[in-house]
Image (tube, rainbow, N blue to C red):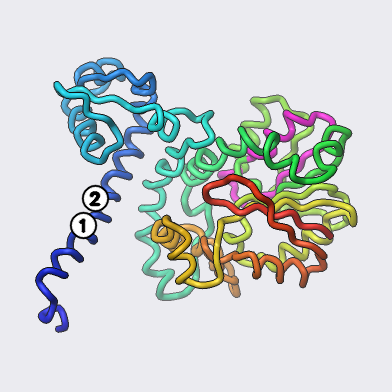
Amino acid sequence: MTSRNADPERLKLYARRAFDHLGGAMTAAMVCLGDHLGLYRALADGRARSPAELAAETGLAERWVREWMYQQGAAGLLEHRGEDRFALAPEGAAVLADEDHPAFGAGFFAQLPALLRVLERLPEAFRTGRGLPYDALGPEGAAGIERGLAPWFRNLLVPVVLPLLPGIPEALARGIRVADVGCGAGAVLATLAQAFPRSDFHGYEISRHALERAEARRAELGLRNLHFHHAEEDPLPEDGRFAFLLTIDCLHDMAHPDRMIRSLRRAISDDGTWLVADIKAHPDYETNLEKNPMAAMMYGTSVLACLSSALSEPGGMGLGTLGLHPALLEKLCVDAGFRRVERLEVPHPVNAFYRVLP
């Protein structure tokens, strides 16, 4: 075995790197737990607490809370203030406690249990080549995706992104038909429907778990200008009725994005606008590695979710998380009959935004 020839010093470094990743998985599990138990929300005021104080506030057992706080302190997510007291910095509160902050990210950690359950089914996918649809993640998966993506769009879609689309804010204010394809739990459409009550909004989705959440939100908000459709049973109309289309973080997950883009071309009016938001990607592995500090995480997410979804139907393109780079998107759009794909300057840490015109 070549392992017998391993250099001792390089072996130490390699083992450290491997176990650092295991440590990251353990920390991610503790973030998921802290989010679920409300521990970050209890710490969000920035005040230092002892394990006993935090346990008393949250109604939890002190010994378990103490071990969690020690782990979070060791991971650098809580600040150790001495005398067995820990605090959550304002930046930590933004990322892990405040669901109204654009930087909130605990929702992504909330998917961890569902992703690990899927892990048990992936050996068969590797043998057969056939992936799993997003509903294999269960209701937790839909909730995690929504909580992960919604805060940024809820805060910045209307004031930051829409002004980059000439004529769209004014048209929405007057009243137009809008479709969000791959709408998930409907957070983006609900934001738009509240902001523009004269427009008519339609969400198309194949995840039943996501649609259940979307319908619950629509009912809770009482939005009569918002409608959701199961795309396999009530597909996107292809009669050019929509003046504005959106696809948010979903094209790379689709088994047949080429077919979908052709459907979108038939669904949009000749003077309409299509807004694409999808993962920032590059044509080759080396560039993804160089430009994306989260490449390892994203390739792992792809195996667990995005690539799995993209290979869940026969003949799927299998793009995966980092598969839809700008040149490929432009080719798919031109092949479908769109005439222009324009990259937008949007300050988003993960997504690239595009304006596509018929």
**What residue appears at the point 19 percent right and 33 percent down from the top-left corner?**
70
**What residue appears at the point 35 percent right and 39 percent down from the top-left corner?**
32
**What residue appears at the point 56 percent right and 56 percent down from the top-left corner?**
279
Please state which of residues 102 and 207 is positioned toward the viewer in this rendering: 102
Q: Are marks 2 and 1 in contact (CB under 8 Å)?
A: yes
**In the rendering, at what x and y percent does residue 259 appear?**
72, 67
> Which residue, given by chain and number where applicable, does mark 2 sit on?
23
Please state which of residues 63 and 77 is positioned toward the viewer in this rendering: 77
Q: Quadrant of residue 20?
A: bottom left
> Which residue, given by chain and number where applicable, does mark 1 sit on?
19
Quarter of the image with the C terminus is bottom right
- Secondary structure at badge 1 equals helix
Amino acid bearing label 2: Gly
Circle 2 packing at 10 Å, graded few (<14), some (14-19), many (20+), is few
Q: Quadrant of residue 79?
A: top left
Magenta-highlighted residues: 186-210
